[in-house]
Amino acid sequence: MGRSTTIRDRHRAIIAKGRPPCALCGEEIDYALPYLDPGEYVVDHIVPLSKGGTDKLENKQPAHRRCNRAKGDRVDGRHILRRSGSLARAR
């Protein structure tokens, strides 16, 4: 069974309500950026679905599209830090 788009949209709105920064790099998110922009707001699964994570709100956090892509399906829990315009894993 597929994921519910109604629940997805509800969770997306709940997370965006306070306009929090990216949970992966800590920088502000421009919530007005268009779809597919590298800096746009996306919802990241803290523990990816492919690694056994749930689609519940507690397993979701705000992220930039570029940061979410850089994280991929890793579960190591370390933040991605932005340095000189590139993404690097924190040590």
Image: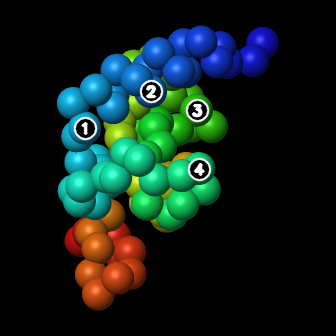
Residue designated by label 4: 35
**Outermost residue toward the right in this view:** 1
Residue 27 is situated, as x and y percent measured from the top left of the image, at 23, 59
Mark 3 → mark 4, Cα distance in angstroms: 22 Å
Mark 2 → mark 4, Cα distance in angstroms: 14 Å
Is 18 placed left or right of 56 in the picture?
left
Mark 3 → mark 2, Cα distance in angstroms: 16 Å
Task: Please tell me whether mark 2 sits on a helix, a strand or a loop.
Answer: helix
Residue designated by label 2: 12
Task: Answer with mark 4 or mark 1, whichever residue precedes in sequence.
Answer: 1
Which label is found at residue 19? 1
Is 12 placed left or right of 85 in the picture?
right
Residue 4 is situated, as x and y percent measured from the top left of the image, at 65, 14
Above or below: residue 70 compared with residue 12: below
The colour scheme is rainbow
Q: Which residue is at the front of the view, 69 or 64?
A: 64
Residue found 62% across the figure and 37% down from its top: 50
Q: Quadrant of the C terminus?
A: bottom left
Q: Amino acid at mark 1?
A: Arg
Disc 2 and disc 1 in contact, CB within 8 angstroms: no
Q: Nearer the viewer, mark 2 or mark 4?
A: 4
Residue designated by label 3: 49
Mark 2 → mark 1, Cα distance in angstroms: 11 Å
Above or below: residue 15 compared with residue 90: above
Q: Nearer the viewer, mark 3 or mark 1?
A: 1
Q: Amino acid at mark 2?
A: Arg
Q: Amino acid at mark 4?
A: Tyr
Task: Please tell me whether mark 1 sits on a helix, a strand or a loop.
Answer: loop
Q: Which residue is at the front of the view, 73 or 19?
A: 19
Task: Please tell me whether mark 4 sits on a helix, a strand or a loop.
Answer: loop
Q: Quadrant of the N terminus?
A: top right
